[in-house]
Image (tube, rainbow, N blue to C red):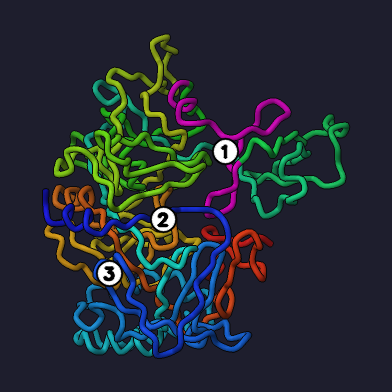
Amino acid sequence: MNKLNRFNRRANTRWFVLPGLAFIMACAGPSQEIQLPGAAPSVATTVPAPESAGANTAGQAASFSTQSATYVATPFDMLPGWKTDNLVESWSAFLGSCSVLSARGGEWQRVCDHARSVALSSNDSVRAFFENEFAPYQVRDDGSKADGVVTGYFEPEVSGSRQYRAPFVYPVYGVPEDMLVLDARKVSKSRATGTVVAKVEGRNVLIETGLNTRTMNAPGLYLLDLSMLTFDSPDRKARLRVEGKRLMPYYTREEIETRGAPNAKVLAFVQDAMQLYEMQVQGAGRIKLNDGATIHLSYAEQNGHPFRPTVAQAGGKKPPVKMRGGMVELDADALEDDEDDPTPTRTRGFKLVAPPPGGRVAVPGRRADSRITGSGIKDPSYVFFRESAPTGAGPLGAMNVPLSPGRSIAVDPRSTPLGFPVFVATRDPSDGKPLRRLTIAQDTGGAIRGAVRADYFFGSGPKAATQARRMKASGQMWVLLPRGLKVAAGGALTKTRGAGTSRELSQCLVETEDQCVDDQ
């Protein structure tokens, strides 16, 4: 057993993704220090006293809460390893975020304008920039726990072909043209379980108020049973399709594999269903062709069904992953069998069960085959890709900027907004030593759910794959917010069992387009 695994057993740290509103314990006085148990490394954090009402801007608020997380102001000198990290290594990733966030104006425009004048030859100047422009807040879960789980991911490379020919028989799909989108924020909560009349405009589904089923003879109108849908994706959107005069949830993985996806462009073919599935879980990949060319793929869309992987049981031990509805519960202390075996099915902190051999899938344009049964992968979710130009760095993440190996992370945008700097303290998967560095939140994924949850991007190649597959440790996170930025809510949230909360809380720390979106 390697040092990291011995550390994980000692940590005895569990992280849960649970629904419901956030709460924090009563704040200590400004000089009282609280030792956080199970941290990696353990950090003494000063919890400031609650600030005056209305102080809901970064740098002024001592603490604030959202539905799933609590944020506590922390001085830079309390961040473990802040003074020793080579912050210059994070600069390229940070500027990538600036290329997107500066368009929002306000605090981000000021911060990014200032960044252009920073002298990169000096680590001290980069550190001074972050200390002057940002205020750190420790991220805690809805139980006020500072410890969470840090895993890793990478960009896989597999062999493939542009044409269907053995052994390359598994299609890699682009976004289907018949997939429609419904914004859940436009659905009245009082009607969320009933049947409504909807119309389709382009790829958008709009609920028609004031109409009933008797109007269904009108062209362009469809019936939609809202009870069939789930709206727990970060972007609060459902994916649909037309079937006769009804709108239905988009096809599951099994349906796509057994019937094909004739409305989606086939980008390439690969030879192994599990390799394709791993590429979907990672959210990006490269396909190496026989002529030496490489197809670069980035995440484009998902079929709207929750991520529910079939996870290997740990030989009588507690499983590393449990599914709760559409959420993933990941345990940093649970270890799988053959824990030092970097197999292709080990990904993002858990080991996937390989499907039975011999599975056949449908291919658009080819004759139907009675032997088609699908790949045998039970996860109903399905990822669609887009072909992207080589970036010279990593693949494009959720922000549509290249990921930086070792400095970009995937997060849950409901608690950590994309583009923001995040300081992470955890353990190195190679030797178990402290890994403390400034990263930039630039990606997300179906397996990345929870307040204190980070997924390191290790890059591409065999070494990156080995590191990513072994990475699973407890860790802590501090999000750096531009000073003066308006945040979700000022003050601390108190919650009494059975009594609810004292006020409505925002779902998002900072509202962003297409990622974390609050109810209107």
Question: For the image shown, how many numbered marks are present on the structure?
Answer: 3
The amino acid type found where label 1 is placed reads Met
Q: Residue at x 26, y 51 (%)?
A: 154
- Asked whether the viewer can see residue 343, the reply is yes
In the image, residue 244 lies in the stretch drawn in magenta: yes
In the image, residue 402 lies in the stretch drawn in magenta: no
| Res. 499 image quadrant | bottom right
The amino acid type found where label 2 is placed reads Thr
Q: Which percent across, then down, holds residue 1?
A: 11, 48
User: Is residue 462 shown left or right of residue 68?
Assistant: left
**Earlier residue among tags 2 and 1:** 1
Q: Residue at x 22, y 73 (%)?
A: 89
Pointer 2: what residue?
Answer: 444
**Earlier residue among tags 1 and 3:** 1
Pointer 1: what residue?
Answer: 179
Number of residues whose C-alpha sits closer than 10 Å to that of mark 3, classed few (under 14), some (14–19) or many (20 or more): many
- Compared with 294, 44 (above or below) is below
Viewer-nearest of discs 3 and 2: 3
Q: Which residues are magenta?
A: 230-258
Viewer-nearest of discs 1 and 3: 3
The amino acid type found where label 3 is placed reads Ala
